[in-house]
């Protein structure tokens, strides 16, 4: 059983990873750690391939952590008032965990030959943490576990995204798509991928998509502006969801789930 180290001061340097969580940058990939909130996310983290660096519990909630982490895991506890002072908001979930962030994979290492679904997802400019979490949860549920992250995209390991994803982000392999035009073109030209962009502009309706034996990278864009035209021009395919009764678009997380569901049926 893990031993709990009782601390009394929120300023203790051993708690630096948990300090001012609400004020931390939302899209920051430069840190090598991330924080999860709540027993469920901590349990998913403990069951994943990711390394847990430490756990922090509010005094009196030690069992929330002891029951789910390995015996060698470092567990700290703080009184409730010090916990709130540390994280920067009223904290009610009882437990936090700090994990080691995996390094982003090179997009050119994407290989869907050994996985059941020949479908990957590229997200470009998604700026809302809840949308990101919802997208990841839908993708994982459908067996799509390769995620390419483009410029100006929110961190999938942000605390809110992890929670909304129900910690399914820990099942994802995440790739660096920082040069999307060059990298997506190389994936299609050199690696034989079909790069499928979602758009509201003139495109093939989703139900008319004709699949071949090529693996597919589905590309979704920013909630407000969609995928840039420069990306559309280099994609092998353009797909759209026809709208009815006056609506011009769907929420990006909802639309992505629909595209993934339909494409998964023909690529899986």
Image (cartoon, grey):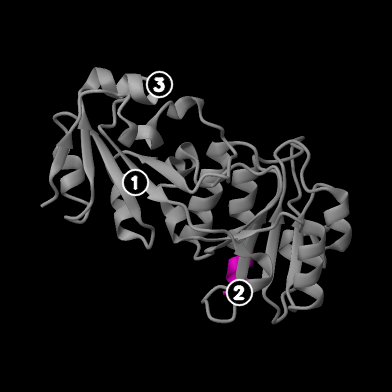
* Residue that lies at the very extreme toward the front in this rendered image: 13
Pointer 2: residues within 10 angstroms few (<14), some, or many (20+)? many
**Figure quadrant of residue 235:** bottom right
**Quadrant of image for the C terminus:** bottom right
Q: Assess whether mark 1 and mark 2 are in contact (beta carbons under 8 angstroms).
A: no
Q: Tag on residue 41?
A: 1
Q: Nearer the viewer, residue 14 or 34?
A: 14
Q: Residue at x 79, y 71 (%)?
A: 186
Q: Secondary structure at mark 1?
A: helix
Q: Nearer the viewer, residue 172 or 142?
A: 172
Kindly report which numbered mark, 2 or 3, lies closer to the viewer in this rendering. 3
Pointer 1: residues within 10 angstroms few (<14), some, or many (20+)? many
Range drawn in magenta: 263-268
Q: Position of residue 108 (x, y in %)?
A: 69, 70
Q: Tag on residue 118?
A: 2
Residue hosting label 3: 88
Q: Is residue 209 visible?
A: no
């Amino acid at each position: 059983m893990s031993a709990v180290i009782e601390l009394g001061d929120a300023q203790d340097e051993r708690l630096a990873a948990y300090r001012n969580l609400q004020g931390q940058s939302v899209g920051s990939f430069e840190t090598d750690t991330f924080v999860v909130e709540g027993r469920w996310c901590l349990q998913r983290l403990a069951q994943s391939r990711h390394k847990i660096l430490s756990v922090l519990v509010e005094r009196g909630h030690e069992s929330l952590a002891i029951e789910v982490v390995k015996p060698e895991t470092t567990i700290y506890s703080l009184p409730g008032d010090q916990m709130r002072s540390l994280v920067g908001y009223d904290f009610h979930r009882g437990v936090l965990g700090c994990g080691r962030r995996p390094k982003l994979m090179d997009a050119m290492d994407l290989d869907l030959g050994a996985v059941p679904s020949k479908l990957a997802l590229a997200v470009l400019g998604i700026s809302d943490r809840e949308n990101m979490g919802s997208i990841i949860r839908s993708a994982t549920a459908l067996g799509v576990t390769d995620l390419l992250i483009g410029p100006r995209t929110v961190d999938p390991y942000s605390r809110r995204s992890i929670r909304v994803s129900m910690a399914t982000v820990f099942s994802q392999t995440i790739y660096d798509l920082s040069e999307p035009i060059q990298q997506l073109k190389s994936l299609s030209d050199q690696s034989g991928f079909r790069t499928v962009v979602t758009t509201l502009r003139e495109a093939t309706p989703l139900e008319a998509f004709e699949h071949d034996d090529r693996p597919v990278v589905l590309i979704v864009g920013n909630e407000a502006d969609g995928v840039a035209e420069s990306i559309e021009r280099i994609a092998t395919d353009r797909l759209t969801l026809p709208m009815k009764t006056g609506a011009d678009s769907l929420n990006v997380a909802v639309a992505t789930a629909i595209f993934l569901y339909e494409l998964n049926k023909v690529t899986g």
